[in-house]
């Protein structure tokens, strides 16, 4: 495999929407997501009202890459070999002795096989994006409450979380103005959404002018997609994209067969009949990567057009696009900036500072004191030996399935299209694919950068 990656060599450039093209004011959006679930649990399912009160310090619990064991209410952080680096029961972190007794240095019992590395099951849930993280805090506090009141085990609250997802985010919720999330985004989008900088808009147009096919593939429904795109890109956003696919139901978009996930046309945001194939560019719903690739062959006139896909979720975007479709993948990872000395990238434009006053929650892309770095952690040595640093499972997946990693599209928008990025590969160091710089915790440790 080549050492470098260039957008100029790609025929098709695809984007996820949420937290990729559309970036959010994370402290505000996280609180809104948390509230949308907490109010449902309290008002509809009778959970403790304590769930409705969140302090700024509570947000430190949130860290991408955690897994929730639904049977025992434990959250865990995994090493690259599947062993458990840190764990908590609810929000209460386990002491080293309890951690050793519970998990030892063996592989976690649910550690997924490589072929099914992105799967979720009825026994655990991985948190890997900013829509997920507020739910991690909520679930941890639910475990605290249940443990305190009745020592409940096994924990069976997950069905209520799923009901909360259905209530707030079902396909008709935006149109019906039900739940908490969509009505609030519609009421005050500027509080939660960040408009695309001019540099990104020009970059998208530059890609189009260079003859690239531009695609938007999002699991958001068409009505919410339109609101986001009009706010961040302008009312003429559709002119930028050759193909728009909403309600894509990723990762199933990549992993399921055409018969399982046919494309559907849309009329007034309502899905219409299933299509036997995809014959022309346009705006569609659901679908599958196989039929999409057949269309891309026709549009480019090439038997194997080269596709790159930008996304923020390893579970929904990066792993399936690489594993099932063999696309190039660019992971948007805001932790790449937030992990550098714990200093977050600006979470909102300066002119908005002070507009929404109140105790400030930790930005979700910054270092968690409870969980440590997203990228590495230390493992206690045996007696009279030093602690050693190991890669997290999340970090290993990044170098395995991402072509490159960037903190935002803005970070590359002013580079020439033929800029040669050093890609992740077995021939390069584990930090090679991070642009513009590796996470500080990796770049500052020579032992890790050479592995």
Image (tube, helix red, strand yellow):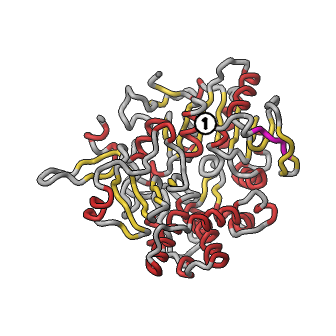
Residue appearing at x 74%, y 35% in the figure: 259
User: Which image quadrant for residue 151?
Assistant: bottom left
Position of 108 compared to 30: left or right? left
Position of 194 compared to 443: left or right? right
Of 218 and 49, nearer the camera is 49
What residue is shown with label 1? 309
Residue 314 position in % (x across, y down): 53, 44
What range of the chain is rendered magenta? 262-266
Say whether residue 75 is visible: yes
Of 261 and 234, nearer the camera is 261
Residue appearing at x 45%, y 65% in the figure: 73
Residue 136 position in % (x across, y down): 51, 63
Q: Is residue 230 above or below residue 424?
A: below
Residue 59 position in % (x across, y down): 47, 67
Task: Give SS at disc 1.
Answer: strand
Q: Is residue 100 above or below residue 407?
A: below
Residue 417 position in % (x across, y down): 58, 30
Say whether residue 440 is visible: no
């Amino acid at each position: 495999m080549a050492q470098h990656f260039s957008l100029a060599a790609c025929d098709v450039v695809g984007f996820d929407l949420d937290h990729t093209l559309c970036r959010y004011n994370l402290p505000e959006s996280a609180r809104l997501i948390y509230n949308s679930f907490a109010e449902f649990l309290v008002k509809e399912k009778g959970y403790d009202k304590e769930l409705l009160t969140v302090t700024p310090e509570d947000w430190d619990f949130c860290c991408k890459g955690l897994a929730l064991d639904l049977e025992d209410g434990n959250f865990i952080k995994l090493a690259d070999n599947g062993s458990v680096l840190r764990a908590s029961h609810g929000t209460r972190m386990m002491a080293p002795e309890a951690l050793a007794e519970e998990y030892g240095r063996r592989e976690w019992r649910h550690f997924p096989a490589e072929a099914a590395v992105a799967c979720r099951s009825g026994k655990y849930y991985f948190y890997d994006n900013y829509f997920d993280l507020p739910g991690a805090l909520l679930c941890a506090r639910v475990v605290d409450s249940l443990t305190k009141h009745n020592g409940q085990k096994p924990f069976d609250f997950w069905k209520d979380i799923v009901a909360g997802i259905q209530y707030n985010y079902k396909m008709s919720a935006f149109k019906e103005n039900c739940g908490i999330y969509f009505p609030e985004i519609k009421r005050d989008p500027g509080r939660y959404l960040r408009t695309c900088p001019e540099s990104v808009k020009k970059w998208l147009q530059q890609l189009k002018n260079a003859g690239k096919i531009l695609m938007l593939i999002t699991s958001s429904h068409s009505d919410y997609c339109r609101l986001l795109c009009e706010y961040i890109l302008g009312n003429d956003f559709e002119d930028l994209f050759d193909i728009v696919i909403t309600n894509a139901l990723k990762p199933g978009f990549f992993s399921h067969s055409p018969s399982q996930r046919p494309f559907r046309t849309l009329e007034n945001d309502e899905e219409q009949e299933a299509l036997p194939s995809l014959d022309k560019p346009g705006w569609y719903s659901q679908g599958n990567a196989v039929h999409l690739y057949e269309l891309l062959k026709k549009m480019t006139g090439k038997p194997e057009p080269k596709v790159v896909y930008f996304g923020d979720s390893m579970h929904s975007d990066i792993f399936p696009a690489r594993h099932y479709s063999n696309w190039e993948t660019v992971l948007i990872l805001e932790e790449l900036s937030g992990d550098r000395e714990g200093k977050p990238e600006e979470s909102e434009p300066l002119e908005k500072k002070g507009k929404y006053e109140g105790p400030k929650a930790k930005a979700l892309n910054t270092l968690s004191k409870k969980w440590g770095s997203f990228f590495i952690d230390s493992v206690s040595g045996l007696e009279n030996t030093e602690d050693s640093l190991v890669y997290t499972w999340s970090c290993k997946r990044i170098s395995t399935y991402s072509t490159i990693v960037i903190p935002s599209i803005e970070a590359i928008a002013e580079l020439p299209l033929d800029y040669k990025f050093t890609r992740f590969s077995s021939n390069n160091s584990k930090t090679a694919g991070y642009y513009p710089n590796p996470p500080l915790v990796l770049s500052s440790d020579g032992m890790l950068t050479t592995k």
